[in-house]
Image (spheres, rainbow, N blue to C red):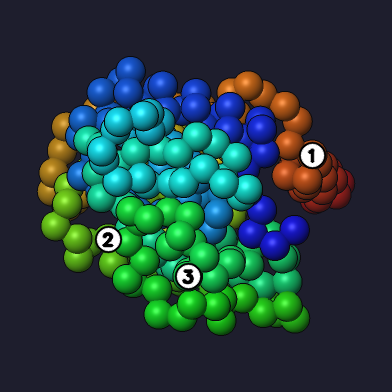
Amino acid sequence: MVDPRLSQLGWEQVENLRKHVHACGLMQRIELVVTSPMLRTMQTAVVVFGGDNIKNGMCASPLMLENVKNDHATVSSLNSPPFLAQELCRERLGVNTCDKRGSISEYKSLFPAIDFSLIESDEDILWRDDVRESDEEVSARGLKFIKWLWTREEIEIAIVTHSAFLFQTLPEFGYDCHPSTKNEICKFFANSELRSVMLLEKSLMGVHPAKTNYPGRIPFVLDLPNDLANMKRESNDNQHQQIGGN
């Protein structure tokens, strides 16, 4: 599928994450929401960090409109932070049609309150059907995205992005951390998982573990493509270790 929407299970997982974000007090601190301009990430972003579902008489402008693609009630922008779409934090580009985005003109009609001003092309000119972005290219794009984050004036920013993008980006950091911290940074993300990452000057000390982290995939089901690939990779790693031991 090209740029698939959230499944019914996905909506349920996103609603559970929204409850967590409000319960832990994170919602009151977020100053900006940056989202990948893919349908599934924008749907996740507006439901988790947006206002309530619009009811009769509510005058706030909508973040997301209910329609065929958004199988969810219209979401209000009332009391929500600004939303900004950024192509740098898209999923790995190329070949897989699920990672090809739709047109920005269509997105603007679906998500009226998301700012798409950073995206230059209406159609997706970054995705190619014959070339898949390499690990190194994703990492380089991830570092470019982090450098862009440093230019923002906001302090607390929510990033709604993709597991493979994060898996290639975050291992570029934490080389001077304790191994357990580095391992936590590098773990693969589950669906609707939330981790708090603080970008600091090295001279700053006394940082405590985040209380806002959320494990994701609630309710849990086997994510067959990803889970089977991970099990196969772990099996291959074990075989390599056994061969090396012999």
Q: Secondary structure at mark 3?
A: helix
Give coordinates of residue 26: x percent, y percent: 27, 29
Residue in the foreground of this view, choosing between 40 and 221: 40
Counting residues from the N terminus, which is met first, the one under dot 3 or under dot 2?
Answer: 3
How far apart, in angstroms, are the residues tagged by discs 2 and 1? 33 Å
Q: Nearer the viewer, mark 3 or mark 2?
A: 3
Counting residues from the N terminus, which is met first, the one under dot 2 or under dot 1?
Answer: 2
Residue 225 seen by the camera: yes
Task: Assess whether mark 2 and mark 3 are in contact (beta carbons under 8 angstroms).
Answer: no
In the rendered image, which quarter contains the N terminus? bottom right
Rendered residue at 57%/46% (across/down):
67
The residue where tag 1 is placed is: 224
Q: Amino acid at mark 1?
A: Leu
Name which quarter of the figure residue 94 lies in: bottom right
Which residue is the extreme one toward the front? 57
Give coordinates of residue 156: x percent, y percent: 22, 43
Q: Amino acid at mark 2?
A: Leu
Q: Secondary structure at mark 2?
A: helix
Residue in the foreground of this view, choosing between 226 and 1: 1
How far apart, in angstroms, are the residues tagged by discs 1 and 3? 33 Å
Counting residues from the N terminus, which is met first, the one under dot 1 or under dot 3?
Answer: 3
Above or below residue 108? Residue 196 is above
Q: Amino acid at mark 3?
A: Ser
Residue in the foreground of this view, choosing between 141 and 73: 73
The residue where tag 2 is placed is: 149
